[in-house]
Amino acid sequence: MGLLGGAISGCSVVRDAATWKMTPSAGPGGAGSQAGAGNSVAPNLTQPAFDVKPLIKPARKYVGLEIPGAPASIAPAEQFATWVGKKPNLLGAYVGWNTGLDSQAVQNAWAYGALYFQVWEPFGVTMQQIAAGASDDYIARFAASVRSLNLPIALSFGHEMNGDWYPWGTKQTAAADFVAAWRHVHDLFAKAGATNVIWIWDPNDIYPVPDVQLQPLYPGDQYVDWIGVTGYWTVNGPHTYSSLFLPTLLDIRKFTAKPFIIAETGVQSGSNQVSSVNALFNAVATHDDILGFVWYDYNRQGDWRLENRPTVQAAFKSAVAASEFGFTVSATR
């Protein structure tokens, strides 16, 4: 989670990467297993890789969710659906480097009718090291697990790279090194035949970092499927589409026509919280190139949950009822 108008520091920063490192199983990354850095995983290439093209720009909008416990357990997503009256169909999880693929989470999301969205946070390694091959064994094994499972996943690597609050951000990493690392990771997935991935390049909205140029950080259209933008609707900072997302999207449109997804968002408590929810849905509904959004339902550096704010929950429930929002991902072929 990035800087909210410069007023609130990134929530993801306070997470200790070791907190959510999963213990790899001893076997390969098949059903219900997690393929860690030390596992021997051979991809199952007996079937063609899952074709993600219909999911890259579907006819209806994604209603995404990041909520504690999901999709390792589907129960939190089911609970959220009861609050808002519609099932989320893009389920996000934050995953640390040297952590194996959570195959069960991918399968849980798929069985629920949702796409698994991994926010891959490369703590403990530099972009220069990744680009130079220091993590090749881990990346190759992870990619083999993705290919072997052969379900679609959305993957964001090194999100909010235009900020200075992550090690892979501007304070510690040159743009060229970030791009080289991204391309190297992507190439290793391609080598493993893991084309069942939707690649998301996810900068923070430019409001708190207006002097950082985005184009030098962009890996290129052949390496990216979606442009994800992280941005939060605040009280004292941006709280309209034209102030929060539009400047970033216009800047990005100078160098790519890839579709957008609001990859992480929430609404700060305050006088404009309901109007911000309505603005979020209106922006997604009225722009063909915005595929949907991912709601951050966490109590971390601020309480972003909607379930304890009746007016926010009611506004969300009313807006998401529109027919263009939500679809069963597993039925899209």
Image (cartoon, grey):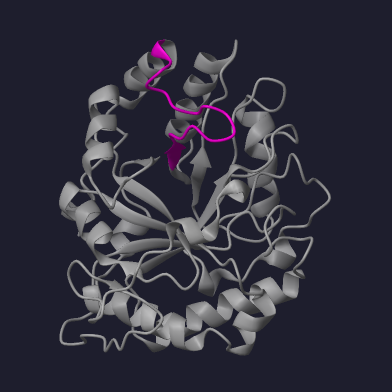
Question: Can you say whether 217 is above or below 278 in the image?
Answer: below
Reply above or below: 41 against 295: below
Q: Classify residue 144 as left or right of residue 299.
A: left
Whether residue 232 is situated above or below residue 229 in the rendered picture: above
Any magenta on residue 312?
no
Which one is in front, 291 or 165?
A: 165
Q: Position of residue 134 (x, y in %)?
A: 58, 87
Residue interval drawn in magenta: 293-310
For the point 67% across and 45% down, which residue is it?
248
Quadrant containing the C terminus is bottom left
* Point 59% across, 42% down: residue: 11
Q: Is residue 114 visible?
A: yes
Nearest to the observer: residue 71 or residue 287: 71
Q: Position of residue 270 (x, y in %)?
A: 59, 14
Against 176, residue 114 (above or below) is: above
Image position, residue 216 (x, y; %):
74, 67
In the displayed image of the protein, which residue is found farthest to the right?
A: 211
Count how many numbered circles sit on residues in the image: 0
Quick one: 149 or 38, which is closer to the camera? Answer: 38
Please say whether residue 200 is visible from this viewpoint: no
Q: Position of residue 168 (x, y in %)?
A: 67, 65
Asked where in the image residue 130 lies, by quadrant, the reply is bottom right
Q: Main secondary structure of the magenta part?
A: loop
